[in-house]
Amino acid sequence: MSHRRSDRVSEAIRAELCEIMRREMRDPRLALATVSRVDLANDLSHAVVGLSILGEDADREAAVEAMSKAAGFLRSQLARRLRLRAVPEMVFRLDRGAEHSQHISDLLESLHDDERS
């Protein structure tokens, strides 16, 4: 399968998961959660879904747990919305990419401020 198709499917799943979370899931643990990425296996049978979640560590873990418990519901919704032969099994992980980027940015800014002093 082409890398391009995998990217399109990955983006379609990410967009639909965001929409499902926003419109159909009423779990308060997901209020500050977004799907940041979907990494698909080459055969589209499995996906690692990265979640970007604001809040404390306990809130983040609770949101990942809520998504994991809703995996069956999410797969059934994706099956209705997307034209795929099979919807991949999903594993949800906390994505700390944005947090890490902000930390690096803060460090660089503090170095820049030290140079000015």
Image (spheres, grey):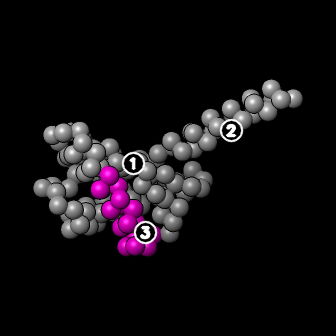
In percent of width and height, residue 49 lies at: 36, 49
Q: Which residue is drawn at the image coordinates 42% and 55% (left, top)?
A: 35
Up the image or down, 106 lies above or below 26; here it is above
Of mark 3 and mark 1, the one earlier in the sequence is 3
Of mark 1 and mark 2, the one earlier in the sequence is 1
Q: Residues within 10 Å of mark 2 (few under 14, many from 20)?
A: few
In percent of width and height, residue 117 lies at: 87, 29
Q: Residues within 10 Å of mark 1 (few under 14, many from 20)?
A: some
- Identify the residue under disc 1: 37
Amino acid carrying label 1: it is Arg
Of mark 2 and mark 3, the one earlier in the sequence is 3
Quadrant where the N terminus lies? top left
- Identify the residue under disc 2: 106
The number of numbered discs placed on residues in the rendered structure image is: 3
In percent of width and height, residue 44 lies at: 20, 46
* 47 inside magenta stretch: no
Residue 72 visible in the current orientation = no
Marks 1 & 2, CB-CB < 8 Å contact: no
The span picked out in magenta is: 11-27
Up the image or down, 30 lies above or below 39; here it is below
